[in-house]
Image: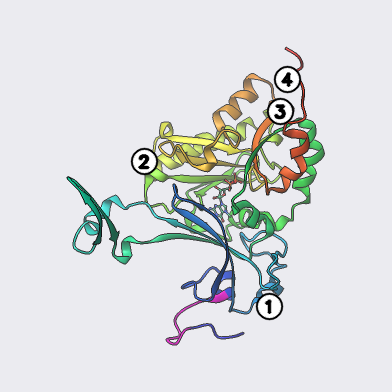
Amino acid sequence: MADHSDAAGQLAVGAEAAAQGRLSCLKDFKVLEVLSEDPVTKSIALLGRFTSGGPEEVAAEEGGSSGGSGGGNSNGSSGSSAPLAVLLLGRKPFDKVAIGQLVGERLRLTPDFANDIYSKYVGFPPPEHAALSVDLVFPATEKHVQKHRQQRRRMVTETPEMYEQIVLPYIQSLPPSRLQWVYNILEKKKEAERLIFEDPHPLTGFMLHPDLKWDQHQVGQLYCLALVHRRDLPSLRSLDASHLPLLRNVRHKGCKAIKERYGVPRSSLRLFVHYHPSYWHFHVHFVHAEMGSFPGAVAGKAILLDDVIDNLCSQGGDYWRRRNLTLQLGEADELWGLLGNEGSGEGEEEEGKEGGGEV
Ligand code: M7G
């Protein structure tokens, strides 16, 4: 294998280091496209390739199971055989504890304008206050690229029949490697040191970890993920009354573990599932209630765990199997291609076709 160290022999760069999750910097990363950017969350998603580090070797290894990378080889359209990478950069929130070190001599200011009692500057913070969160998906599949590409949001109403005939076969066709990161966690091959709580019961048990999205610095931005141990529940649609003990267990023990570890009470937690999820292995999101407006919390995506449980109890054990579900899909999502025609409601001339018959 080629030597990718710098002159001092210190830096890990290129595709090989990226595939092993031990990059020192992004030397030799070529940006091919800005997939999306969000001025509100101050984040940007980039598509790129590593131009060193033996792309051929990495491409050859890609058929194996590489945690978190998903399945399949995605070479994009630029003609190179090197695998694609999705790079997500985000500005980190202020560290309130260390704010005294930021607001001082080391915050250099360039005046922008002044008017009466108002003035504006551009500030250049010292390096320890300029950190970015950097998430890399490598090798990235076409599905990862699609997920992060700016695209129109569309709403679709999925009937139980559309689920059975279209969505379920789609889920079953996904390569198992797409869930490799989940199985790595459940088998304690990855993120074992980040485990917050585990109930090992094969039917009602789960593991609770900090979500990839949370750096664990600020409790006000708490984001944890409960992955159930059982592997036969792709999503909300698979739930029936027999799963109530599982759901109640996740709710009760997950909240208790978060209270003990982070001091956040249940009344400050928003517990929800996504429909459609990105990963079809049943999991529950635990997010600080103060975090109200983030893309994963919108109607058409998030369903409160309390509502999931309550509807199974009050509306019948098959509630989530028999009802229509209206949800948001990106236009680049394969499922929009599969469901859009039938589920967009655009061809419908009359109202009142909801499940449950005419009212
Ligand atoms: P989802 O509802 O399937 O899709 O949630 P979403 O991504 O549209 O929300 C999956 C959750 O798993 C998300 O909150 C991800 O941030 C989180 N996640 C994804 N990966 C690949 C990892 C990982 O490797 N480790 C951890 N801890 N969380 C992950």
Tag on residue 324? 3
Q: Is residue 141 left or right of residue 126?
A: right
Q: Residue 24's spot in the image, x, y percent? A: 46, 73
Dot 3 or dot 2: first in sequence order is: 2
Residue at image location 64% in from the left, 48% down from the top? 279
| Residue designated by label 2 | 263
Can residue 191 be seen at all in this image of the molecule? no
Q: Residues within 10 Å of mark 1 (few under 14, many from 20)?
A: some
Nearer the observer: mark 4 or 1; the answer is 4
Helix, strand or loop under label 2: loop
Q: CA distance from mark 3 to mark 2?
A: 38 Å
The magenta region covers: 6-14
Q: Is mark 4 within 8 Å of ligand 1?
A: no
How far separated are the C-alphas under marks 4 and 1?
55 Å
| Residue 10 lies in the magenta-colored region | yes
Tell me the CA gap for discs 4 and 3: 14 Å
Residue designated by label 1: 56
Q: Are marks 4 and 2 in contact (CB under 8 Å)?
A: no
Q: Using the rendered view, name the quadrant where residue 275 is placed.
A: top right
- The residue at the far front in this view is 115
Residue 334 image offset from top left, x and y in percent = 72, 48
Q: Which badge, 4 or 3, comes first in the chain's sequence?
A: 3
Whole-angstrom CA distance, mark 4 to mark 2, is 48 Å
For the residue pair 15 and 204, the one nearer the viewer reads as 15
Q: Secondary structure at mark 4?
A: loop
Choose between 142 and 224: the one closer to the eye: 142
Residue at the image point whose x is 60% and y is 29% from the top: 308
Q: Which mark is residue 351?
A: 4
- Residue type pointed to by label 2: Gly
Q: Position of residue 185 (x, y in %)?
A: 58, 55
Earlier sequence position, callout 4 versus callout 1 = 1
